[in-house]
Image (cartoon, rainbow, N blue to C red):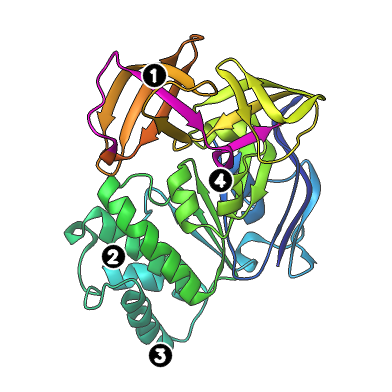
Amino acid sequence: MLELKDITKSYTPGNPVLRDINLSVAAGDIVCLLGPSGCGKTTLLRVVAGLEKLDSGAIFFDQVNLAPVEIHKRNFGFMFQEYALFPHKSVGQNVAFGLRMADWPAAEIKPRVAEMLDLVDLQGYAERTIFELSGGERQRVALARSLAPNPRLLMLDEPLGSLDRSLREELMTELRIILKEIGVTALYVTHDQEEAFAIADQIVLLNAGKIEQSGPPAEVYAQPGSEFAARFLGFQNLLTTQIHAADPSVARTSIGPITLLQPSPVGTHTLLIRPDALILLPAPQPDAHSAVVRTTSFRGDHVRVQFDATTGVTLTVQLPVDVGVIQTGETLYFRVDPKKVVLLG
């Protein structure tokens, strides 16, 4: 439905904010633009909306080039972090605003407002003022307003960024349910990995204006495409490794050899060890690794342990709570589960 071809955008000469962006979005999909501040997420959203002009490239929607299409004729919806609700209007009037701007018949506006408030679980709120609402309720009103005119594409820019953690957790799940129920195609900007994984059908990870990696959330998480992707997704245990032709199924690292599931290309790589990759052993064994515990932190369903391997490498892992008490300064013996390591380029 939405196709971006060779998109570039600069605000100052020689310093592109977007670099050769190519992206296809299927009808009804929720695509999360994920990445650190300054990577180009919001700029990409703005060029799709028509709020910024491209330096080069083209944007197509339903196979129609959007370049000559005026912003108000694109029928795209917007939802922002700061809500952008009208304080002098009631909840119902806020939701109705886009309908009036789109010249909906007066007789259809009231039932549509009621339908949208019902969708976001705010039945009976139409006459309330914005000041009577909590932050989460205001965000629901903003969502109802953006969906009311039945947009062809909904664009959301950090919509949960100003909410506290518990409310964000609640709305993450609800937001995906609502968007999938409506069936609207959506571009969703966030810097929060957990939020992106919870909401998206497709993750597009941006780095310095380029697409670093894209794919379904489970695929991106299971197989980060680069060291940048792995670090941004929160993985900390990244070791330089060598693969030798004599034994291409073994990664030679600074903590010792680690067995891989299959032969890998010869050369220098980065090995990602997932936090749950360790298999603890009761005593030292010839092919085991050892490490000294630096810190421990109980996290409810697991214990987070940071330790120093004998070679000086620091690893951070998650151990099940049933392993018993782990003391600072204690030596642990372990193997690395080959199913829970990823060889990066």
Q: What is the crowding at mark 4: few (fewer than 14 residues within 10 Å), some, or many (at least 20)?
A: some
Cα separation between marks 3 and 4: 48 Å
Q: Are marks 1 and 3 in contact (CB under 8 Å)?
A: no
The N terminus: image quadrant: bottom right
Q: Give the amino acid at mark 2.
A: Lys
Cα separation between marks 2 and 4: 43 Å
Answer with the quarter of the image where residue 87 lies.
bottom left
Give the farthest residue toward the left. Answer: 132
The residue labelled by disc 3 is 107
- Seen from the viewer's position, the closer of residues 234 and 7 is 234
Answer with the quarter of the image where residue 272 lies.
top right
Q: Which residue is drawn at 38% across and 61% down?
A: 173
The residue labelled by disc 1 is 307
The residue labelled by disc 4 is 221
Expressed as whole percent of the image width and height from the top left, the position of residue 73 reads 64, 68
Say if the magenta span includes residue 330: yes
Q: Tell me the SS state at disc 2.
A: loop
Q: Is residue 87 visible?
A: no
Q: Tell me the SS state at disc 4.
A: helix
The residue labelled by disc 2 is 89
Q: What is the crowding at mark 1: few (fewer than 14 residues within 10 Å), some, or many (at least 20)?
A: many
Q: Which of marks 1 and 3 is nearer the N terminus?
A: 3
Left or right relative to 112: residue 329: left
Q: Residue at x 38, y 45 (%)?
A: 161
Answer with the quarter of the image where residue 128 lies.
bottom left
The C terminus: image quadrant: top right
Expressed as whole percent of the image width and height from the top left, the position of residue 268 reads 74, 21
Write the start and end of the magenta stretch as one range: 323-344
Q: Residue 252 carries which label?
A: none
Q: Can residue 116 be seen in this view?
A: yes
